[in-house]
Amino acid sequence: MTIFTTMVTNKLNASALAVAVVVAAIAAASPDVVCAFRLSPSYSSSQRVLLPPSSPASTVGDVIRSAARDKQMRWPHGPLFSSVPERSSSSSSTVNSSPPPPPLSTLVNRVAVAGATGRTGRYVVEELLRRNVRVLAMVRDVDKANDVLDPTNEYLTIRRTDLGDRDDVISALNDDDGCDAAIWCATGFSDSPDQSWLARLTALFGFATNSKASIDAVGLPALGEGLAKRGVGGSGYGDGGGGGGGGGNASLPRVVMLSSAGVTRPDWSDEKKKALEGSAAIPIVRLNPFGILGLKKESEERLRTCGVDYCIFRPCGLNDNWSPNQRPIFSQGDVAVGRINRMDVARILVDILSTPEATGKTFEAFSIANSEGYYPPAPSLGPALARLVPDDHNAGRGLSEESVRVTYALMQQLLPGEKQDPARLAMGQTYEQLDRDERGRLGERGTEVAPIRTT
Ligand SMILES: NC(=O)c1ccc[n+]([C@@H]2O[C@H](COP(=O)([O-])OP(=O)(O)OC[C@H]3O[C@@H](n4cnc5c(N)ncnc54)[C@H](OP(=O)(O)O)[C@@H]3O)[C@@H](O)[C@H]2O)c1
């Protein structure tokens, strides 16, 4: 088995070379292991070195020895490591060279945005308008929409819509010449126009105890139902029938759901929670206020089964202090932990509409801040999403548990901060505060009071 490790060095300095020597010595002790180093003069020696996903290990040696033992480890579509760096393997070179999709305005006539006045929703509307796409903003508060959106834009229609009423949602989709795609950015987590704490708490209890009445459970499948009956406009790019494909023959997604990383974690077995503690013990999963994650998971399932071509996008923590315009790291298995700026989330949600490789898939994402120098966002999501599996993969079970485990091992190395131990975070505490041993805004881990709104 060969392990490819990109060593980061600056002028081949002594510390980097010392690490290289240690790793090479470990490799020499294991005849099956070959290490390939790319020595780059432009990299800094203090950068994090990513090691191949393997069984949980605490040292470089553990990882390498364990990877050597695990010779059969395979990524969903092929070997995880090969004897040379995989930059030009046939499958990835094919997808990497795929042309960018046509402009979205040639693919759709009008896009409905549910939750258009939200902190993510307004960026989604802006992004669509910036691409000359007509937008139907479905809102509950028209005055707020007039404030936070640009009502003078001739491509924008603002419509008061009751997202908890199936018929109203379907009727909105058919207004004028209708919509042919939709992005769901609304949440039932703040389910009342009255934003007092008491009103929110009351609404949330209603939401949590009667999920059939929540906007996610009613409005989201209604979007799917309404759009499943309509044809896609524009050039028909990506049309080929049958959603859920992994490549260019799939249809385009008609409904894109902004969901959340972590929705499956409360339901993991105790054994899995222990093995993947860095994903299972983060504050939102540990506290899961009012069962919000289960409700989102249930809404996801309603979308999957309502007959429309869909995509479910689950970002990690939304954080507007995290730099925008970063490269997103996509993964599956619901093990990702990290942060992403809402503007990047909005761009991805809009990009998905012109990405057939997204259809029928569910995936998570965070971004690596300060990556703008050499890791800009890719011009197209297609190559990255083509590598992900559709929801009907593995008889509907998604990734195998082994693939989830190796994904976890890699994702945990991409955590923000220095301590990189999200299981120690308190709700409301940042990675930076954890690094400095400072309390978060809601107090110590284990005694914090979960807020009604976690965003
Ligand atoms: N915070 C995180 O770290 C995180 C991580 C991953 C995923 N997410 C998810 O990302 C999504 C968007 O987050 P965000 O921060 O953009 O949310 P947000 O700012 O709270 O926006 C929510 C939107 O939903 C609308 N809404 C709520 N209840 C409604 C109702 N009954 N009828 C109509 N509209 C309703 C709100 O309308 P008003 O403008 O009128 O209030 C608002 O436009 C949420 O589903 C959230 O769970 C969050």
Image: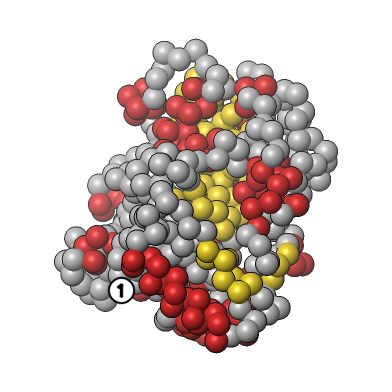
Residue 127 position in % (x across, y down):
48, 29
Residue 128 position in % (x across, y down):
52, 27
Return the residue nearer the eye: 90 or 40: 40
Q: Which residue is mark 1?
A: 424
Q: From the viewer's perspective, tell me whether residue 444 is left or right of residue 44.
A: left
Q: From the viewer's perspective, tell me whether residue 212 is left or right of residue 323.
A: right
Mark 1 crowd level (few <14, some 14–19, many ≥20, 10 Å Cα):
some
Cβ(mark 1) to ligand 1 < 8 Å? no
Residue at horizontal 55 percent and vertical 19 percent from the top: 132
Residue 428 position in % (x across, y down):
26, 61
Q: From the viewer's perspective, tell me whether residue 101 is left or right of residue 55.
A: right
Relative to 367, does residue 223 appear above or below in the rendering?
A: above
Numbered disc total: 1
Q: From the viewer's perspective, tell me whether residue 455 is left or right of residue 407.
A: left
Relative to 257, does residue 126 appear above or below in the rendering?
A: above
Residue at horizontal 56 percent and vertical 58 percent from the top: 331
Relative to 24, does residue 95 appear above or below in the rendering?
A: above
Q: Amino acid at mark 1?
A: Arg
Return the residue nearer the eye: 232 or 344: 344
Residue at horizontal 66 percent and vertical 19 percent from the top: 177
Residue 325 position in % (x across, y down):
42, 39
Residue at horizontal 57 percent and vertical 36 percent from the top: 379
Q: Is residue 126 visible?
A: yes
Q: Is residue 442 visible?
A: no
Q: How is the image coloured?
A: secondary structure
Quadrant of res 289: bottom left
Q: Give the quadrant of the N terminus.
A: bottom right
Q: Secondary structure at mark 1?
A: helix
Return the residue nearer the eye: 106 or 4: 4
